[in-house]
Amino acid sequence: MTRKRPIVAIDGPAGAGKSTVARRLADALAYVLVDTGAMYRAVALAAKRAGVAWSDGPGLGQLAHGLVADNALSFERDPGLGVRVKLVTKEAREDISEAIRTPDMAQGASLVSAHSQVRDVLLELQRLAGRGGGVVLEGRDIGTVVFPDAEVKFFLTASADVRAKRRHAELAAKGQTVSYEETLADVKRRDAQDEGRAVAPLKQAEGAILVDSTNLTFEQTVAHMLEHVTRAVEANEAREARKT
Ligand code: DC
């Protein structure tokens, strides 16, 4: 399938810097940004509040289905946060952007995302959000499952140690007191869960460009990825121009 504007897929393990890079690329290209991890985190939070266990696949599937059917999740672009997430119920419209970005919800999202009942519901939402192109999607299975035909696919990674250091600094900046050792253990646990699950495990998609940011600064990483995307955008434009 060819689209007027490309889909940019960014997958990779926890703490590789996907969110920040995705935000920068979306800004530079004026593309829509879709943070699919935020969707899993929102389901994890809603489940916790509703008393549905993170191990209960059918219960979580039903809950996720209800959230989508009721239009209860809203995702808005936010210059500071990347994506602002709201949970809309009959009673209130609650901003859950901060509440979903805790180590507990990261773990919850990882567990919740292992259930096919949840993935099926969110997959539909993600395809709907991205199918027109002109979009940057970041997650774990964008290039393998959600949009295997994305025009540009990246697998962004870094060593577990470097990812834990970055995550730890991020949490500390937000005033969350977690030790580096705990953060490293969290990163490794999530890697094992996300790579080891049966449904849509985290892996490098066919045709994905591997970007290892262990020894790159953030700016170098962004510049390198933007170069690839710019080339793909130009190729796309040339193809579109030939059609007219
Ligand atoms: O990117 P993140 O840390 O916000 O993602 C939270 C969890 O959600 C992650 O550990 C695995 C899951 N996830 C997923 O399974 N598939 C995606 N496309 C995005 C996230």
Image: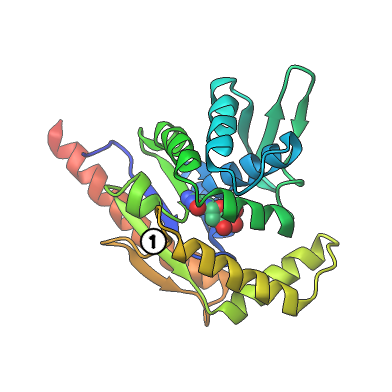
Question: What residue is rendered at 62% in x and 30% in y?
Answer: 73
Viewer-nearest residue: 53 or 169? 53
Q: State whether residue 94 is above or below residue 220.
A: above
Considering the image in quadrants, where does the N terminus appear? top left
Viewer-nearest residue: 11 or 79? 11
Q: Is residue 79 left or right of residue 239?
A: right
| Residue pointed to by mark 1 | 154
Residue 164 placement (x, y as % from top left): 65, 74
Q: Which quadrant holds residue 238?
A: top left
Q: Across the whole image, how many numbered discs are drawn on residues?
A: 1
Residue 11 visible (yes or no): yes
Single out the residue that lies furthest toward the top: 90
Considering the image in quadrants, where does the C terminus appear? top left
Q: State whether residue 31 is above or below residue 19.
A: above
Residue 197 placement (x, y as % from top left): 45, 60
Q: State whether residue 144 is above or below residue 240.
A: below
Question: What residue is rendered at 34% in x and 49% in y?
Answer: 145
Residue 83 visible (yes or no): no
Viewer-nearest residue: 242 or 184? 184
- What kind of element bears circle 1? strand
Colour pattern of the rendering? rainbow
Q: Amino acid at mark 1?
A: Phe
